[in-house]
Amino acid sequence: MSDKLIQIIKAIGSFTDDEIDFFVSRLKEQFIPKGEHFLTEGQVSRHLGFIVSGIGMHYRNYEGVEIPTDFTIENEWLGYLNSFTNKTVSDMNIKVLEDTQLLTLSAEDFEKVYLFQPKFILLKDYYTELSFINHTRHTADLAMLDAKQRYYKFMKEKPHLVNRVPQYYIAAYLGIKPQSLSRIRK
Amino acid sequence: MSDKLIQIIKAIGSFTDDEIDFFVSRLKEQFIPKGEHFLTEGQVSRHLGFIVSGIGMHYRNYEGVEIPTDFTIENEWLGYLNSFTNKTVSDMNIKVLEDTQLLTLSAEDFEKVYLFQPKFILLKDYYTELSFINHTRHTADLAMLDAKQRYYKFMKEKPHLVNRVPQYYIAAYLGIKPQSLSRIRK
DNA sequence: GTTCGTTATTAACAAATGTGAACGATATTG
DNA sequence: CAATATCGTTCACATTTGTTAATAACGAAC
């Protein structure tokens, strides 16, 4: 179940088998049914989750409207690293769009992992940067492209999401109305 | 010159006077004339700069068009923390919109500061989170609001930028054409 | 102060996107 | 399986935003 995870960790930094065992042994399985939240705004994020199966959505609750900022699938980490790292109250929400199976790591266990081998901070920094870059790219797309171009780019870059994420969430992610997205698709 | 900086550092974490002296003594003065770059994409960011006077702009070069993602003024830090922290090649640019006076800290000196007192990592984490939150808010604005609402919000939240940043950059930041911004202002 | 390049404004028109409402399709529940 | 709610599509029309081009305002350099 954690094979793929191990492979990914090894790709990010050079860790010994012992170090990886130490990390993996701290993971716990968690199941989240479709539609339920992994993190709700106002909470402090105390866990990260590696997605074994399923799909998660980060979103900002904007005057009652859910604006997705990120979609996360199998073999990616689900979580809000800023809140997790700094123990700050989250201003974001994370919920799953399908029944989702996770391998979770608690903040306390990450501390232990980090004390055992400080190099593991690399993982956090790597994902923090990745997330930041993805966000600023998406922001530039919203500022620069029209609705049609945004949707084409979405289809091209995230084809695996087109049929897994409800259209009204894709529309909200792209900053357009569902009706306009329908028109573009036609 | 660094009074305000010291005050800000103290507000973020509890540091002793000795620790703050150690930090501040590593700062160097740097002047950047209007229009020049502090960081260019393709480079690794080796310095952070605390703005004593002037104004900086982070932007993404999008097929030749400059899309601002952030404006930074006096008493704020100028820099791309991801690239600085992880020594990765930057995909962002930073330039100044006015003659700008900085207090800079090199990556090597930050290492020294951090080894002297690991608590200083708090500063990095604090600013990383702040920057991320600002970005996702802006992204949600772009996805959710129309041009007029975006400009009103910009005026309300960043009145100090309205007359310091050229309109065509404000327009690009808000994802609208300069002509449309003129129309809205009228 | 004049000149020149840059930035901001204005207008008419074209194109894109939003709105509201109706209908169909699909999924969920009992 | 039927009933119900949710989601996706379509259309006509309103509104917003982009486009092109001309002009005005501004600022920097001489």
Image (cartoon, coloured by chain):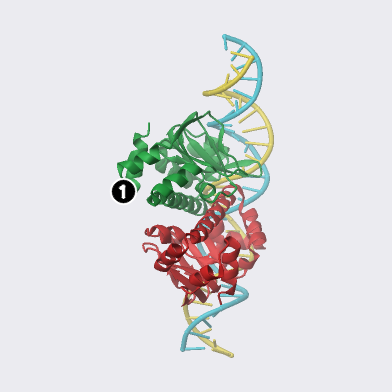
Chain colours: A green, B red, C yellow, D cyan
Could you tell me which residue is drawn at 59 percent across and 51 percent down? B141
Q: Residue A6 at x, y = what percent?
A: 34, 39
Q: Nearer the viewer, residue B76 or A13?
A: A13
x and y percentages locating residue D25 in the rendered image:
62, 75
Q: Chain of mark 1?
A: A
Query: Is residue B23 placed above or below A28 in the rendered structure?
Result: below
List the residue tagged with mark 1: A14
Q: Position of residue A72 (x, y in %)?
A: 46, 39
Task: Tell me residue D18's x, y (percent).
Answer: 53, 55
Residue pictured at 54% horizontal, 57% vertical: B126
Quadrant containing the C terminus of chain B in the rendered view: bottom right
C10 in relation to A6, above or below: below
Q: Residue at 52% of width from left, 66% of height from top?
A: B77
**Three-letter amino acid code at the position of disc 1:** Ser
Q: Horizontal placement of A80 versus D6: left or right? A: left
Q: Quadrant of the N terminus of chain B?
A: bottom right
Q: Quadrant of residue A22?
A: top left
* Image vertical order of residue A159 relative to residue B175, above or below: above
What secondary structure is found at the residue carrying circle 1? loop
Q: Residues within 10 Å of mark 1 (few under 14, many from 20)?
A: few
Q: Number of numbered discs present?
A: 1
